[in-house]
Amino acid sequence: MPGGKKKAYDLMEPILLKCAAQVEDGACTGYLGPIGAGNYVKMVHNGIEYGDMQLIAEVYDVLRGIVGMTNVEMSRQFTRWNDGDLSSYLIEITAKILAKDDDVTGTGYVVDYILDKTGTKGTGRWTVQEAAEQSVAAPTIAASLDSRYISGRKGERVEAAKILQGPTEVPNVSKPQIVEDLGAALYCAKVCSYAQGMGIIKAASEEKDWDVDLSQCAKMWKGGCIIRAKLLDKIQAALANDSNLVNLMVDPGFAKELNARQMSWRRIVTLCVASGVPCPALSASLNYFDSYRRENLPANLTQAQRDFFGGHTYERIDMKGPHHCVWTKKHKAIGDLNERSAGEQSSRL
């Protein structure tokens, strides 16, 4: 994912094209933009990777804890998913991991002996920080990062398990239906994770005048990357078809798929909540979808509260310009509203 001076890249390009992973439409590399652009795209790639891994872990948790599958059965299910729309490197290796016999004791499977604490090198945190800097919602990626932090507090969780209780009654749902719904939910949530990552890159590129080609990013990730997946073919095509696409979810192809599969997604999140099985990334993705698709959100009340306690002003739906309400007898007029809201108007918020 090279970036830097174009002249320097041009000199290196023949070597980079030969060294890079190759897919049907060419080498998985290309010029991304000035100094910083390449590293930034790689950082966001890792953030998407965090989200993808957490989503798969949540699906695994449902298969294991609610459906009651054995490791071999789960391995076979991930193998089946890898033969369809969910085909990806991470799905492929998950199938292999689940079926790997323990190489120390010779009993059971390696994955069942691994302590449930996930490490982090920092790129996921940086991605979430950048999302905040760019005022881009990235709840799937943020949820995956939070999940790693909670996993790291193993000692606290052991003690909490002795005190805090989950539901005593869980829904009785058809196991085949759960498995079918899980595939659809995972696909939808993955689309959201990629949409968030692309949104971060797009915002940073516009701010820094990098002119990053998002379809080129998708092409680069199709081979030789941890997040390489069949889904990237569709993402590349959508972004190539419309370089100004504001969000992957509103691409006609993806919108049709999300609309068609959403009830499976909702059933899985509902099942997890009712069963006391955490699904932070799956649910964050669904909330992202629901928030983005709504013409009206309850943000009007939040803005009214801000104006009530801080005189932050608000915009009206029936006229232009900032407005302030003298909410009670204790409130006072705040003078020039344009001056009051000048700082906020200059920000992305």
Image (cartoon, rainbow, N blue to C red):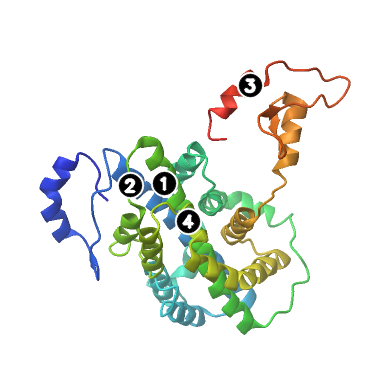
Residue sitting nearer the eye, 223 or 206: 206
Q: Which of marks 1 and 3 is nearer the N terminus?
A: 1
Residue at the (72%, 38%) spot, across then down: 318
Instruction: Specify few, some or many for label 1: CA neighbours under 10 Å numbering under 14, 14-19, or 20 or more.
Output: many
Q: Which amino acid does label 1 sit on?
A: Lys
Residue 186 in sight here: no
Amino acid at circle 2: Val
The residue that disc 2 covers is: 212
Q: What element carries label 1?
A: helix
Q: Which amino acid does label 3 sit on?
A: Asn
Do residues under tags 2 and 1 come within 8 Å of each other at their CB atoms? yes
Find disc 3 in the rendering and name its residue: 338
In this rendering, does residue 16 appear at all?
Answer: yes
User: Which residue appears farthest toward the right when viewing the image?
Assistant: 329
Residue mark closest to the camera, 1 vs 3: 3
- Left/right placement of residue 276 relative to residue 120 reads right
Q: Position of residue 223 (x, y in %)?
A: 29, 64
Residue in front for this viewpoint, 35 or 278: 35
Task: Using the rendered view, name the quadrant where residue 260 is placed.
Answer: bottom right
**Residue closer to the observer: 150 or 143:** 143
- Which callout, 4 or 3, points to the residue nearer the camera? 3
For the point 25% across and 60% down, the residue is 28
Foreground label between 3 and 2: 3
Give percent across and percent down for residue 8: 14, 42
The residue indicated by pointer 4 is: 195
Amino acid type for the residue under numbered disc 4: Ala
Query: Marks 3 and 2, how far apart in space?
Result: 35 Å
Disc number placed over residue 34 in the picture, else none: none
